[in-house]
Structure formats: C-alpha cells, structure tokens
Amino acid sequence: MKAHKAILVTESGETYYGWSFCESLTSLGEIVFNTGMTGYQEVITDPSYSGQIVNFTYPEIGNTGINNDDVESRMPLLNGIITKNICVNPSNWRLNQSLISYMKEKKIMHIYGIDTRKLTKYLRSHGTMYGCISTEILEPRSLTLTMLNEIPLKKIQLKDSVVNASTPASYHPSNIRPYFPCYYQSSQQKDNLLKNLTVIVIDFGVKYNILRNLNKYVKNVIVVPATTNSQRILEYKPDGVLLSNGPGDPENVQYAVRNVLDLIEAKVPLFGICMGHQIISLALGLRTFKLRFGHRGLNHPVGLDKTISISSQNHGYAIKMDNQKLRCVKITQFNGNDLTIAAISHKIYPSFSVQYHPEASPGPHDSETLFLHFIRVIELINRYPVIV
C-alpha cells in the first residue's frame, strides 16, 4: 500500500501538501466541511455531497473500515475527501473492507496529512469555494490554472445536480435491510404497526435510512425519479408524498417546484426533508439563498421557544425570511446557531418540512418521530379531508 504525494489548491490560491493512496488522479469540486465525529461512511455515500470535496474536521477517519450495512446510496457521488489521518489498520466486527481499499475501488480522490482545522477556519472566514486535489499535477500554479479553466464548465455541468443523484427508474425499496437493533422511543412501540398506506418518495438523492424509516410504518413505499410529473404521481393514488434530500441549488430544479405545487393544490399530505423542504418552500412562493459555509454536522440545535432538539444537517442553502410570503406558513423551528428557518408547516394544506435530517445516519435520533407524525397526518387527512 503505497502513498503518493498530493496537493490541494483552493480557487483563492491556498495550497496544502499531503499524501494520497490514489495514483495519477485529479479531482475538482466545491470544498465543504463536516464537523461530525462519527459516520464517515454514511457521509461518503450521502448523495447530497454530489460533486463536492468533503473536509472532515475530526482528525482520523477509517478506524472502523467500511461495512455493507451503513451505505446510504447505491454509489458515492462526492468528488473527494480531505482528512488529517486515515487509519490503515481498521477494526470492527462488521468490517468488510478498509476505507483505503474502498476509496481505491470507487476511485474517490483524497488527500490526508494536512491541517484540516486550519482549512475549516479558512472556509468559515471566506466561504465555501472550489478546490482541486491532485497526485499528477504537483506544482500549485499549474494546478491553479487547470482548476480555474475547469470551474466554469463544472458549474454548468452541476447546474442540476439532482439528475445524477436521483434513481433512473421507479422501485419498491423492499430489499433495504433495517438496522438491528432498531431505535424506537417507548412512545413509538405501540404504534410500530405496518399501515396499509401508499407513500411516494420523490428521489432528489434519497438516503436509504429515510426509506428504512418509512418501511417501519408503511406497507407500500414507491421511490420515483425526481423528474416524475405530478400527474404520474397522482396516478399512484398516494396517501402521502415524501420529498427527499438531495444535492445542489434547489432553484435549479424548477420542474420539481411546479410538480410539488400541483401536489399541494391536490391536498396530498407532503413531508419534505432538506432539499425537499426547500422545494416545498419555493412552491409556496418563498426564496432560497446560499449559506456562507453551510450546515454540515451532527449537533445542530433546532427548536422554538424553550424546546430544543439536536439534529443532523447537511445543506448549503436555506430559506429567506419573508414575512409577507410566510403568511400561509407557520415556522415551527429555527436553527439555534444562526436563526435560519429549520422547519415549516402550511396553515391550511397538510404539508410540512424540515431543513435537517430526522433519519440521521449519522447523527442523533431526536427527530425520528417525524416519520410517525407524517403517518398520523396521512391517517387524519384520510379521515377528515381538507376542504378549502
């Protein structure tokens, strides 16, 4: 197992020297940082990181290797990994292969041996930016020129990042195995009965743990591509529709915004997660904006008044405060760190959404009950239809 010299250059010219187990590779992407202390495998396989280079602030990753149960999608879509250390001798009872062999197999470009916390502080001060990792171009000026020439093309290619992250065809997620042990709060135990309901998941880059949570409560879950039109979705006669997480700028997927507006007007119960939250908000006339360095970690406080939950988050965009446009919407939670909108609920239609990940994986389970809440909303609407 041979390490090769590698360099990381940001579009602003910052240069970091390190090592990589990938030979003769160059990768370009938006550099973002994740502050989680656990769950590197779930982060690597989260489709929301499509096209990005993830800087892990935790000093060592790879110590438990890679297993077959904790993947969150069919394949990793991120463009690179930055870390201080990579464990070369992993140990875990579920271990299937080392992180190093996984990255080589999947051709995930990476660099280790750099000061990741210094890089994080730089990104916090200057905002997220494009960067390039290379083991074939080791002269910073040459790599900077190469990167600056490619960035405009890269931005065009990633204008609609959802297309690459979404499923190409509809499917039933029955082959996704549940976690054991399953984590249920005592109040959920009596409600853990499969309901004879049909829930459609619009896949903007769905994580498998969202599907696992739905499979706990619903007999018929159908995942459809992000481009599926509202008429086709309504032909399934869904009891509810879940809008998944996903990568990129939500304002670049206007086809989804139009479809969701149709579903809202059809009075179908909707539950939006992360990208799904932003698309519901856009459909209601709100706007999004890009955060300076995003929210990516496992300990973000969300709540209202004196109630706080700890959440897992991964997004670079948020909803703008607009009191005039918010008249039809109730803000049910704010982010405790920067007071951005964390959750909304429509005042008339059965639609609600959150800017964080209640399925976690990795992260806390404080908000996992939202899936059960979604099922209860569906049952309530089936019993007492909305009349507008």
Image (cartoon, grey):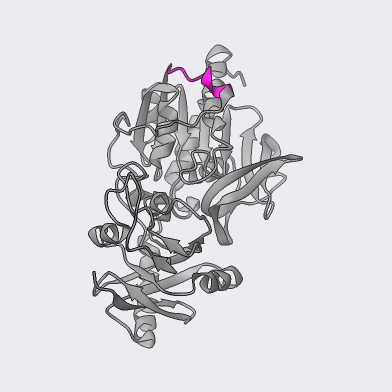
Vertical position of residue 236 compared to residue 260: above or below: above
Vertical position of residue 14 compared to residue 75: above or below: below
Q: Would residue 364 be found to the left or right of residue 133 on screen? A: right
- Do we see residue 230 in this rendering? no
Q: Would residue 228 be found to the left or right of residue 126 on screen? A: left
Q: Residue at x 63, y 38 (%)?
A: 344
Q: Is residue 194 magenta?
A: yes
- Give the quarter of the image for residue 103: bottom left
Q: Residue at x 51, y 28 (%)?
A: 184
Vertical position of residue 375 compared to residue 26: above or below: above
Q: Residue at x 67, y 45 (%)?
A: 334
Where residue 234 appears, as percent x and y from the top left, is: 40, 26
Q: Would residue 382 be found to the left or right of residue 301 on screen? A: left
Which residue of the protein is positioned furthest toward the right in this rendering? Answer: 305
Q: Would residue 121 be found to the left or right of residue 30 on screen? A: right
- Do we see residue 322 in this rendering? yes
Q: Which residues are magenta?
A: 187-195
Where residue 119 appears, as percent x and y from the top left, is: 51, 72
Where residue 1 appears, as percent x and y from the top left, is: 23, 69
Where residue 270 appears, as percent x and y from the top left, is: 52, 31
Q: Is residue 352 magenta?
A: no
Q: Residue at x 53, y 29 (%)?
A: 265
The C terminus sits in image quarter: top right
How many numbered discs sit on the rendered protein? 0
- Give the quarter of the image for residue 99: bottom left
